Amino acid sequence: MEIITKFLEKNGLVVAFLSVGIVIYVSGIISDKLTNKKIPASAIAILMGLVLAYIGGVYTQGEKGIADIKIFSGFGMMGGSMLRDFAIVSTAMGASFLVMKRTGWVGALSLFLGIVLSFLAGVVVALLGGYTDAISLTTIGAGACTYIVGPVTGAAIGANSDVMALSIAAGVVKAVAVTIGTPFIAKYIGLNNPHTAMIFGGLMGTTSGVTAGLAATDPKLVPYGALTATFYTGLGCLFCPSILFLLMKMIFG
Amino acid sequence: MIIYGVAILAFCYVIGQLFGEFLGKSIGVDANVGGVGFAMLLLIILSDWINKKGYLDRNTENGIMFWNQMYIPIVVAMSATQNVRVAFSSGFIAVLAGLVPIIICAITIPFLAKLSKNTQLD
């Protein structure tokens, strides 16, 4: 038994390939037989991934989902930012440059709106939760952008650690909710073309949520959403600790 | 050859991500600004150029398409490594702070889409 665990641990990435392959195979069967292909296999697979992450988290009390279980540590490598970004870039092959160019300005607008609206929504929620100081409000508002903007902003303006943790949690909730929710809201918001996908990416911003959500909705839309979403975290880290923090300081002192 | 395709992809990735890092540094942010986006644009332009020159054979393209096909499996692995436990067990404020922005932004999408479609007709 020990030999097996050691072996699986040592060959983590390959074990992850195998495990994900099985997850997708099972998802395909579920999609086929149980939902009559109404829910795409990729959506079920991503959902199963989240369930695995939850199980892993509860079992180990760690932060990296299933990857905290030693024999599945390869999931961390396979789903890490390097391979993820590498694969996202490859989706640009076959994407239309024309559409991207035409949607360029509205993509930029959606980025700006996405950051400001998410930030303000986060601030309002924080106010309702009883936070009144500019630093905590800004940090939680930043967490409502993405789970990276939150701690980066918090660290920059000197937030205390429980507010930072809260902002990270808000960002994680957002990423998970976008992942699960996108296929369901897609038809109500007209998310079925590259044009809207770019706006969607800019407004939601969470790269993991947007790309996973679009993959579950229609994989053809992924490159368009990813293109705008990839600017979001960086711009969020630019705006939140600066202009938006000053704004909060002006209002809340 | 397959490796040429992978190498082209890697070239775009490295250049784009580096550009994003430097852009972040230059505007004083401790984060990568649009690295993946620049890499994607570079890949679109580069693959188009190589294609026109006639250098893009089937195998080279497969080197890129392999990763294109691996995208969803990688996303599944990524989902499996999210901190879902925290997302579910975090307090009411964190859940609301995560959900309310999504709702507001989702409502905004049709308006923005319409706005940009109208101007396209002009």
Image (spheres, grey):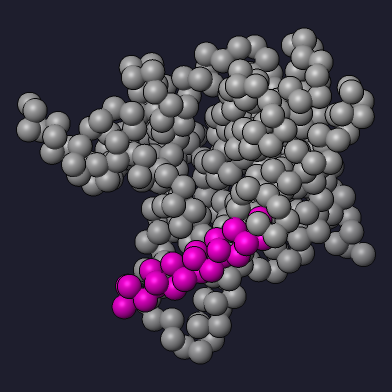
Check if residue B18 falls in the magenta segment: yes
Q: Who is closer to the viewer here, B20 or A25?
A: B20
Q: Is residue A209 above or below residue A99?
A: above
Vertical order, A107 against B75 (above or below): below
Which image quarter holds the N terminus of chain B? Answer: bottom left
Tell me how many marks there are: 0
Residue at the front extreme, as displayed = A158
- Relative to residue B7, is residue A9 drawn left or right? left
In percent of the image, x 74 and y 22: which residue is there?
Answer: A136
Q: Position of residue A181 (x, y in %)?
A: 60, 30
Is residue A32 among what the camera can see? no
Residue A70 sits in quarter = top left
Q: Nearer the viewer, residue A235 or B56?
A: A235
What stretch of residues is rendered in magenta?
Answer: B1-24
Whether residue A134 is visible: yes
| Residue at the spot 40% in from the left edge and 56% down from the top edge | B69
What kind of secondary structure does the magenta stretch mostly adopt? helix
On-image quarter of the C terminus of chain B: bottom right
| Residue A242 point in image, percent of width and height | 80, 41
Tell me where residue A153 appears, x and y as whole percent. 68, 36
Front position in the image: A53 or A153: A153
- Residue B20 sits above or below residue B93 on the image: below
Question: x and y percent of residue A32 in the render?
Answer: 38, 35
Q: Is residue A96 left or right of residue A40?
A: right
Q: On the rendered structure, is B38 left or right of A188?
A: left
Q: Is residue A128 on the magenta stretch?
A: no
Residue A225 versus residue A44 in the image, above or below: below
Query: What residue sits 80% from the left and 19% below the top?
Result: A133
